[in-house]
Image: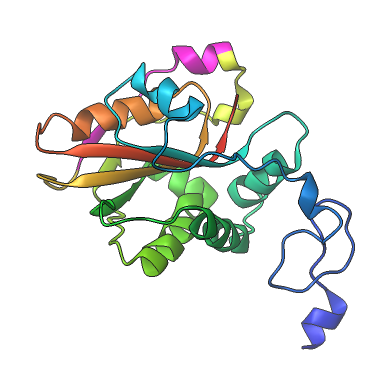
Amino acid sequence: MLLDLLFPNRCLHCNSIISKEELVCEVCFPQIKFYHYHFYEENPLKNRCKLLFPVENAFALMQFEKESLSRKLVHQLKYRSQKNVGKILAEWTSEKVKLTNDKPDILLTVPLHPKKLKERGYNQLHLFADTLSKIWEIPHHKKALKRNSYQKAQAQKDKSHRAETKYDFSLAEEISGKHVLLIDDVFTTGNTLSAIAWEILKNPNNKVSILVMAYDL
């Protein structure tokens, strides 16, 4: 409790003191640009995915715009080790995504290369997906995917150079006859998710849906 007094939790936007279960204060919360489309309906993200690979459903929690609060939230999780952000974003996601009987069989998260994992110390997607796994009662297969090539951080590249990046992924376990919900932090060019989706879809009995924290319009 002494630590809470000395180092209180603060709003990631205005720095006002808030409870430890929150990310932003009530005043700043409306500034988050949520992506108001449902998981099971046709939407711009799903249409973007369709241009790259066969997709069942697609959902983004927020819009990822320059200097936006949603961008700040993702970067706090990804680069500043604020892992509680992943848990809270997952809780927000579960409030917006109400899965029906046609729900995915497994959750897969985009893996980090072992070198990048050592540098960062954690995969920012794991707590997010683990929280969803508990809420939805869908297993999260953390080690099912393997990234075979090391890339520098995408945040250091502009959008045109991200589109040129080549990705090399493989399956570390057999997946057959499964509806896979593939999870990433931000959808920008779609190259990462496309490379993984095609690995999964090499087995014609598999299906792929997409969930991202934010969609870079």
13 versus 23 height, above or below? above
Between 198 and 136, the residue placed more toward the observer is: 136
Q: Is residue 78 visible?
A: yes
Residue 37 percent across, percent down from the top left: 53, 39
Give the side of residue 113 with respect to residue 146, left or right.
Answer: right
103 versus 169 height, above or below? below
The residue depicted at 39 percent of the width and 24 percent of the height is: 49
Q: Quadrant of the N terminus?
A: bottom right
The residue depicted at 58 percent of the width and 56 percent of the height is: 89
Residue 128 percent across, percent down from the top left: 48, 57
Based on the displayed image, in which of its 4 quarters is residue 198 positioned? top left
The residue depicted at 48 percent of the width and 55 percent of the height is: 122
Residue farthest bottom in this picture? 1
Based on the displayed image, in which of its 4 quarters is residue 182 positioned? top left
Based on the displayed image, in which of its 4 quarters is residue 202 positioned? top left
Residue 15 percent across, percent down from the top left: 88, 58
Residue 167 percent across, percent down from the top left: 35, 24
Give the side of residue 158 with respect to residue 198, left or right.
Answer: right
Between 65 and 117, the residue placed more toward the observer is: 65
The mark total stands at 0
The residue depicted at 35 percent of the width and 21 percent of the height is: 50
Give the side of residue 28 with respect to residue 166, left or right.
Answer: right
Does the stretch in magenta take in 154? no
Does the stretch in magenta take in 161? yes
Q: Is residue 111 visible?
A: no
Q: Quadrant of the C terminus?
A: top right
Check the image and tell me how it is coloured. rainbow
99 versus 209 height, above or below? below
The magenta stretch spans which residues? 160-171
